[in-house]
Image: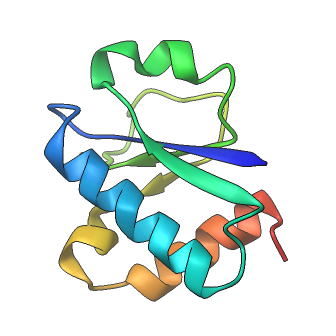
Amino acid sequence: MKTIIVACGGGIATSATTATKINGRLDDMGLSGKAKAEAVDIKSLDMFMNTADLYVSVTPMARGQQEYPIPTVSGIPFLTGIGADQAMQQIVELLKLK
């Protein structure tokens, strides 16, 4: 099973909301057995990078931002609803779930 980690600035509310929305979409797509999103504490993000397959960031992703060893996708669309379908498709493609 692929692991998606979700972290926000505080590591609490918005990351948990985003992870729940991603898991709901995975379930709707029949992919809940292939991947799971988990909210993590932003302070321990580096520790999770070694075991995760994809990182969903709920903080603005600026150019020159730290590079991570796994693909990174913006989670903002899951909070605003604008571009959420495209962000979900990007996750599915990056993880090769279909």
Residue at the image position 47 percent from the left and 87 percent from the top = 85
**Which corner quadrant of the image does residue 65 belong to?**
top left
User: Between 69 and 38, which is closer to the camera in this rendering?
Assistant: 38
Q: Is residue 10 left or right of residue 72?
A: left
The quadrant of the picture occupied by the C terminus is: bottom right
33 displayed left or right of 63: right
Along the line of sight, the residue nearer the viewer: 37 or 67: 37
How far from the left and from the top, in percent, is residue 31?
72, 73
Could you tell me if residue 75 is visible in this image?
Answer: no
| 15 shown above or below 69 | below
User: Which residue is depicted at the point 31% across and 25% down?
Assistant: 41
Q: Is residue 35 above or below residue 47?
A: below
Residue 29's spot in the image, x, y percent? 65, 85
Residue 1: horizontal and vertical position, in percent? 79, 48
Front residue of 14/67: it is 14
Q: Residue at x 26, y 58 (%)?
A: 17
User: Is residue 14 placed above or below 7 in the rendered structure?
Assistant: below
Q: Nearer the viewer, residue 24 or 89?
A: 24
Q: Can you see residue 73?
A: yes
Apparent side of residue 75 relative to residue 52 in the rendered image (left or right): left
Quarter of the image where one finds residue 97 = bottom right
Residue 20, above or below 83: above
**Measuring 62% from the left and 65% from the top, which residue is drawn there?**
91
Q: Left of 89 or right of it: where is 97? A: right
- Colour logic: rainbow
How many labels sit on residues?
0
Give the image location of residue 25, x and y in percent.
Answer: 51, 78
